[in-house]
Amino acid sequence: MAFLILFHFPEFSGQFCRRFIMLQIQDIRNNLDEISGRLSKRGQDFSSLLKTAIEKDDVRKETQTELDSYLAEINQASKQIGALYKEGKREEADQLKEKVSELKSKTKDLDEKLKAAELEVYNVLTQIPNAPGVNVPAGKSENDNKIMSTHGEAPVLSQNLPHWELASKYDLIDFELGVKITGAGFPVYKGKGARLQRALINWFLDRARDEGFEEVLPPILVNEDSGFGTGQLPDKEGQMYHVTGDNLYVIPTAEVPITNMYRDVILNSSDLPIKNCGYTPCFRREAGSYGKDVRGLNRLHQFDKVEIVQIVNPKESYDVLESMQKYVQSLLRDLGLHYRVLLLCGGDTGFASAMTYDMEVWSAAQERWLEVSSVSNFESFQANRLKLRVKDEEGNKVLAHTLNGSALALPRILAALLENNQSEEGIRVPEVLVPYCGFDLIS
RNA sequence: GGAGAGGUGGCAGAGUGGUCGAAUGCGGCAGUCUUGAAAACUGUUGAGGGUCACACCUCCGGGGGUUCGAAUCCCUCCCUCUCCGCCA
């Protein structure tokens, strides 16, 4: 295991692995009870892991202190040797050399011990997910998620075709053609289907800009460091497409390149908040997904998404989370969709997130809710990996808080729009999109 | 793909075996002067670990080696730039 990690991530053997790992060990030391309590909301007891982390770190500290004292002696002796040579005192110098080589043999063992200790701390810490925020309900599964609100009403329809049938009826999306070109999960959007897709992207981006997000158009291939920075690597490697020839990964979300723009950065607090939005196609291998859940646009290997990202002062992150989830709601409302807002319980909250809202739209024909957005506050969990820090007024450096959300993911929005707005005359296009796509009815 | 050059602090750019965590300039911060600002002058200004605070340790692209001692020498990997070829 150790070899595997070191092999894939040479930086682990350097300072990277030493201090910047997920939850901060310093935080765990200072707020053990609080963090333990928050983590328990995930429906699992992490207290022993937390204790182990501290114990392992104690060993690491001890070892380092011991090693450092030897290194200090060696450094001093080396300086003396230089001075002795200058004075022409060969013999004394040679004696000291022997002493140094003795000391050096001791440091070799200690150095190995230190690296092993660091790896042990790392291995423990990476098993610990982010501590859920104070308002996150306890719970083990999606059944414990809290429905915060439901908006609009399910449409009353004279016909009720699922979106894949509508797509085929009006020649909007060709799934079989995608299979021919690439494979399942890579649909071809055609005609008004393609135009509607483009309209949604542009509308989402314009709305985000009005909301103060600066648009970026990032690369969709990222290197290993970036994959690690946002936590896709090393654990979720199998979920990304991997271009082995160049050792690059195809992004599963714009979060990866956008957030990594701020990797290894120390910001001034006056730079905050940083608000970025970006459109990218997203690619997910979705290995092991089958069945009716993946029918049509429900689950794809390639899809389009506009993402919003914020980097904020730690004190403000929960207020910002609220404003972001309200913003996403405003999009759904303007599209006239029947939707609901879930606050995920501890157990359903993603590994890196402290608090997550999911937005789900109603699929009239499938008669179920489809997740179209996930808005999360990562607190400092992600910033810790990224080494993204803020210098406050006193010059103290603290980890920034990062947040992101989909605003929005396109396929399920399109599915809901098609299904919910259908009638014998055709499919009505939401008013806000008409200027963007140039038609108000698909018939 | 072929040939060459190079990776040093926020940036530019010195440093080719010892007292170098690193000259100098720019930028940043603080102060003097000024009604205020600019200019000028003075001081200050990398990151991480460790400590009550010091001490001390680590870091000059990554990893390894030579040496009492490495930014400096050797090996190796990665990356960037320039020219040629190919090409949206």
Image (tube, coloured by chain):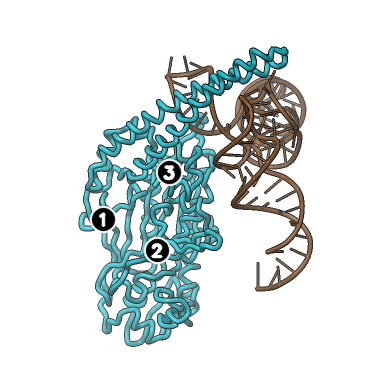
Chain colours: A cyan, B brown
Return the mark for residue A8. Answer: none
Q: Chain of mark 2?
A: A
Rounded to the nearest angstrom, the CA distance separating label 1 from label 3 is 24 Å
Quadrant housing residue A374: bottom left
Quadrant housing residue A423: bottom left
- Residue at 36% x, 50% y is A322
* SS class, disc 2: helix
Q: How many marks?
A: 3
Q: Give the camera-side residue of B5 and B74.
A: B74
Residue located beneath label 3 in the image: A401
Looking at numbered disc 2 in the image, what kind of residue is underneath it? Leu
Residue located beneath label 1 in the image: A148
Looking at numbered disc 3 in the image, what kind of residue is underneath it? His
Residue located beneath label 2 in the image: A331
Instruction: Decide: few, some or many residues near mark 1? Use Cα within 10 Å; few <14, some 14-19, many ≥20.
Output: few
Labels 1 and 3 within one chain: yes
Residue A26: horizontal and vertical position, in percent?
Answer: 38, 32
- Residue at 42% x, 54% y is A232
Regarding residue A7, the answer to whether it shows in the image is yes
Regarding residue A421, the answer to whether it shows in the image is no
The quarter in which the C terminus of chain A is drawn is bottom left
* SS class, disc 1: strand
Looking at numbered disc 1 in the image, what kind of residue is underneath it? Met
Q: CB atoms at circles 2 and 3 under 8 Å apart?
A: no
Indicate which label's residue lies in the foreground, 1 or 3.
Answer: 3
Q: Earlier in the sequence, mark 2 or mark 3?
A: 2
